[in-house]
Image (spheres, coloured by chain):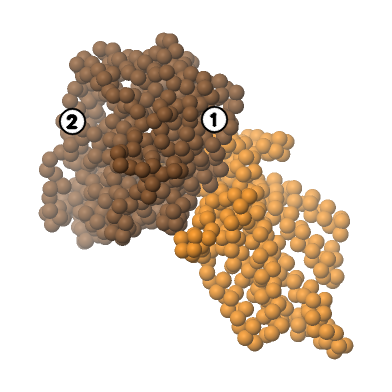
């Protein structure tokens, strides 16, 4: 197991390097640059800007300089579009925000999703099942870009209960709507996966054996059914967790959280190379890390899996 | 010429002191003086040298003060400069500065301006607006930007602590009007040198405006507090100005209605409904930008567009009234000139397309196309490129429908913003959507665009046009020259002008002092106050 983790980590480093190089090249291939705007800059002004940001170096040199700066100094450089800030600062500002609402959404989606799925599977084909399936389909078909403005309309304009957007770490009332809007559709998916996987497990031999030897039903479910039923859910949760904590552009836009999800999309559209690279590396590293974590969890849950 | 300059100088010297706007009689002030306005996006920079957008300018106008500020109509009134004199040849401006302090208590000196302007043109600053000092024709700006001369050679000098002298390369009739722009603001040398790039962050930033930076949560909100060190602080009523970012216009409107914002832009198409429901809040005022479809007549452009008759037919058959009244619906005006109708001192040429009924225009367009041997049987095929935006898409579809019956088949080509601008600049388009906003309130801010050496993405060129604008630099009466220039644009049709912008906003009626007649919608927090409801 330990060797497996080590091996995976050893592969992770070249993977990240490749990711950096590929993203860097792709980004520079896209037409336009950070300084193309409605008004063309005089060539001399553009030349000064490019010199200042090192954009006039050959591409391989730019990549090398970037790698050195990131690996050796952990410095992601200055933002092209927000010249008052460095990429490190932008990520340090935005990531805690998405980590907070994303992490809470993840918890909410897992707790409610798994509960809904389990309940629906246990009382299969009863009204409980129909209700649970109904809720999860409803949540699935209501995309967050519809849900978000609706929430603002109801809780901000009609009931005046919650602030319509913005962010504060000290005031949880700012967190409520982003968490609901982000968690809903994930909760629905988790509920559906849990339900079908649970149904399958409940029909399997070892459950029949457990029941036959007179084990109380709640123990059958918690000790013998839930664990194997979680396997497909967990493989779904790994990447979902990363995408949730690195933010959602929709949530960031509708609730103006200042999170990193919007920063990522904006940086691509604005050709803010530095910010885009910074967030790409962050998301890439987290994805590798959590995929590894999922594999480890797998082995822990399913004794049949050995690395 | 001498007379003109003498008068300008005299007028400025005699102008009443530019104190902040005061509450009218009978108005009761609200207890909390806070103004919260909407921002679509994060503020990119608070550094005057690095600012590139309107949102940044709105904040900086409150944090700093330039030589000139604008009144409610957009006319120049003294800011840091109490008065100025112009030399007879129109090349030297001497400003006398008022006694004023930075927010850290240090005095504002002529040297702060010298330092700030030199900083803008220094190549290492990498200012995207370095060209602005070239536009102002400040001596040596171009050579310094090109790295051919040291920044201290810039045509700006501090004769003493309170006297600033600016030297121009050529007489520039609009020079004074450029002085309320953020790029010309002074910056505190000691603070910039101490903190480097981080000097504009909360806690570091020092300004000479009516407000100071209290906090700045990027992409969430920016909060400004009244600056007790401001020279006119005793007349400033507003205590707090907040800019709140809401990335979605519709959500912003909901939050305005929930009382979270005092001002928000009205989303496209909602002005008619809102102005009926809330006549005292929904406001449409002219906004100094023009929208056009630019024809590429350059090397890379299609052959068919090099035929003036085709371009004219396209301009004629574009039904601007429908675009303005049925699509935009926000008090915009149909455009038949490139210069925005509300630009100071501008009068559109008489006659022309604007006075022709639509049937005549269509008949004429059909005739022109037939002359060029095009028509429904032998259609002109063109690509119309626009950047991703609902309004641009709607307008492009409308244009496609207006042109189709005449035998002009348009293929719509939607690209993202960066690709759009990149292709515009490299001349890789056929017809492209474009808009230009006034940098200052005078016609050349628009007309310069079509000069042979102007931005001019369509690569149109006309000697008489260039000569007219050159002549206007030193002419006493520029109006007829600008009129003639617009006539040339109407004859030659390098672009089909579509509409002149309006700014359509919901404004809380308790907020007073926001300008409604200033073409560039330049507002100052110092002029605002909140009345009790």
Count of numbered circles in the view:
2
Quick one: B424 or B42, which is closer to the camera?
A: B42
Q: Earlier in the sequence, mark 1 or mark 2?
A: 1
Q: Residue B396's x, y, as percent? A: 32, 55
Question: Few, some or many C-alpha atoms within 10 Å of disc 2 (few <14, some 14-19, many ≥20)?
Answer: some
The residues tagged by marks 1 and 2 sit, at their Cα atoms, a distance apart of: 43 Å
Color used for chain B? Answer: brown
Q: At 79% from the left edge and 66% from the top edge, which residue is drawn?
A: A298
Does the CB distance between marks 1 and 2 fall below 8 Å? no
Residue B39 vs B452, above or below: the answer is below
- The N terminus of chain B sits in image quarter: top left
Nearer mark to the viewer, of 1 and 2: 1
The chain coloured orange in the image = A
Quick one: A186 or B390, which is closer to the camera?
A: A186
Q: At 67% from the left edge and 58% from the top edge, which residue is drawn?
A: A103
**Is any atom of residue B337 visible in this view?**
yes
- The chain letter under disc 2 is B
Q: At 52% from the left edge and 35% from the top edge, which residue is drawn?
A: B213
Q: Residue B395's x, y, as percent? A: 31, 55
Which residue in the protein does label 1 denote?
B205
SS of the residue at dot 1? Answer: loop
The picture quadrant where one finds residue B346 is top left
Q: Residue B14's x, y, as percent? A: 26, 20
Residue B206 vs B532, above or below: the answer is above
- The chain letter under disc 1 is B
Which residue in the protein does label 2 denote?
B479
């Amino acid at each position: 197991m330990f060797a497996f983790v080590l091996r995976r980590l050893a592969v992770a480093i070249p993977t990240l390097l490749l990711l950096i190089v590929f993203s860097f090249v792709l980004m520079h291939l896209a037409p336009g640059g950070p300084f193309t705007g409605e008004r063309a800059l005089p060539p001399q002004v553009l030349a000064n800007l490019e010199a200042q940001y090192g954009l006039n170096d050959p591409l391989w040199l730019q990549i090398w300089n970037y790698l050195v700066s990131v690996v050796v100094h952990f410095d992601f450089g200055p933002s092209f579009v927000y010249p008052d800030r460095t990429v490190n600062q932008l990520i340090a500002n935005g990531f805690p925000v998405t980590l907070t609402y994303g992490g809470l959404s993840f918890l909410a989606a897992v707790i409610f999703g798994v509960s809904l799925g389990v309940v629906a599977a246990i009382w299969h084909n009863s009204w409980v099942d129909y209700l649970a399936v109904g809720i999860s389909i409803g949540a699935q078909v209501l995309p967050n870009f519809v849900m978000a403005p609706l929430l603002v309309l109801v809780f901000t304009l009609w009931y005046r209960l919650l602030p319509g957007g913005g962010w504060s770490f000290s005031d949880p009332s700012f967190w409520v709507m982003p968490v609901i809007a982000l968690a809903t559709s994930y909760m629905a998916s988790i509920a559906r996966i849990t339900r079908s996987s649970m149904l399958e497990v409940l029909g399997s031999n070892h459950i029949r054996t457990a029941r036959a030897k007179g084990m109380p039903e709640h123990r059958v479910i918690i000790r013998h059914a839930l664990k194997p039923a979680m396997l497909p859910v967990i493989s779904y949760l790994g990447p979902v967790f990363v995408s949730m904590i690195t933010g959602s552009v929709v949530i960031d836009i509708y609730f103006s959280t200042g999170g990193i999800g919007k920063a990522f999309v904006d940086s691509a559209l604005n050709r803010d190379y530095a910010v885009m690279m910074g967030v790409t590396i962050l998301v890439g590293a987290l994805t590798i890390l959590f995929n590894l974590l999922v594999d480890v969890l797998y082995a822990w849950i399913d004794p049949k899996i050995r690395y | 010429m001498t007379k003109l300059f003498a008068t300008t100088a005299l007028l400025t010297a005699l102008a009443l002191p530019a104190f902040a706007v005061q509450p009218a009689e009978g108005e009761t002030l609200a207890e909390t003086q806070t103004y919260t306005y909407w921002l679509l996006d994060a503020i990119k920079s608070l550094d005057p040298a690095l600012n590139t957008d309107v949102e940044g300018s709105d904040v900086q106008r409150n944090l700093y003060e330039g030589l000139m500020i604008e009144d409610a109509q957009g006319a120049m009134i003294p800011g840091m400069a109490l008065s100025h004199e112009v030399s007879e040849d129109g090349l030297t401006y001497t400003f006398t500065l008022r006694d004023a302090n930075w927010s850290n208590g240090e005095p504002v000196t002529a040297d702060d301006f010298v330092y700030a302007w030199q900083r803008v043109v220094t190549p290492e600053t990498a200012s995207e607006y370095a060209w602005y000092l070239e536009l102002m024709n400040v001596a040596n700006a171009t050579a310094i930007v090109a790295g051919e001369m040291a920044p201290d050679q810039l045509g700006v000098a501090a004769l003493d602590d309170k006297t600033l002298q600016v030297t121009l390369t050529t007489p520039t009739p609009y020079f004074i009007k450029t002085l309320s722009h953020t790029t010309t603001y002074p910056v505190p040398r000691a603070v910039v040198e101490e903190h480097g790039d981080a000097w504009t962050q909360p806690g570091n930033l020092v300004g000479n405006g009516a407000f100071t930076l209290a906090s700045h949560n990027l992409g969430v909100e920016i909060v400004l507090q009244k600056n007790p060190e401001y020279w006119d602080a005793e007349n400033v009523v507003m205590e707090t100005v907040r800019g709140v970012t809401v990335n979605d216009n519709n959500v912003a409107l909901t939050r305005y209605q929930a009382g979270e914002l005092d001002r928000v832009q009205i989303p496209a198409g909602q002005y008619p409904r809102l102005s009926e429901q809330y006549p005292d809040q929904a406001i449409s005022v002219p906004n100094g930008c023009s929208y056009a479809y630019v024809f590429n007549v350059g090397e890379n452009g299609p052959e068919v567009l090099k035929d003036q008759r085709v371009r004219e037919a396209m301009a004629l058959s574009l039904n601007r009234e429908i675009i303005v009244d049925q699509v935009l619906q926000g008090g915009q005006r149909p455009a038949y000139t490139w210069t925005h109708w509300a630009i100071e001192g501008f009068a559109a040429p008489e006659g022309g397309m604007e006075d022709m009924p639509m049937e005549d225009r269509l008949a004429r367009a059909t005739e022109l196309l037939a002359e060029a041997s095009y028509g429904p049987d032998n259609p002109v095929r063109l690509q119309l490129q626009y950047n991703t935006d609902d309004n641009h898409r709607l307008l492009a579809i409308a244009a496609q429908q207006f042109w189709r019956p005449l035998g002009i088949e348009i293929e719509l080509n939607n690209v993202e913003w960066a690709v759009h601008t990149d292709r515009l600049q490299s001349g890789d388009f056929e017809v492209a959507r474009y808009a230009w906003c006034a940098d200052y309130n005078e016609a050349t801010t628009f007309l310069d665009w079509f000069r042979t050496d102007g931005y001019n993405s369509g690569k149109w060129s006309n000697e008489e046009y260039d000569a007219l604008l050159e002549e206007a630099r030193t002419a006493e009466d520029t109006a007829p020259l600008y009129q003639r220039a617009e006539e040339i644009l109407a004859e030659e049709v390098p672009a089909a002008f579509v509409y002149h912008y309006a700014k359509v906003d919901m404004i809380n009626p308790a907020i007073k002092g926001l300008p409604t007649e200033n073409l560039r919608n330049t507002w100052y927090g110092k002029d605002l106050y909140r009345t009790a409801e």
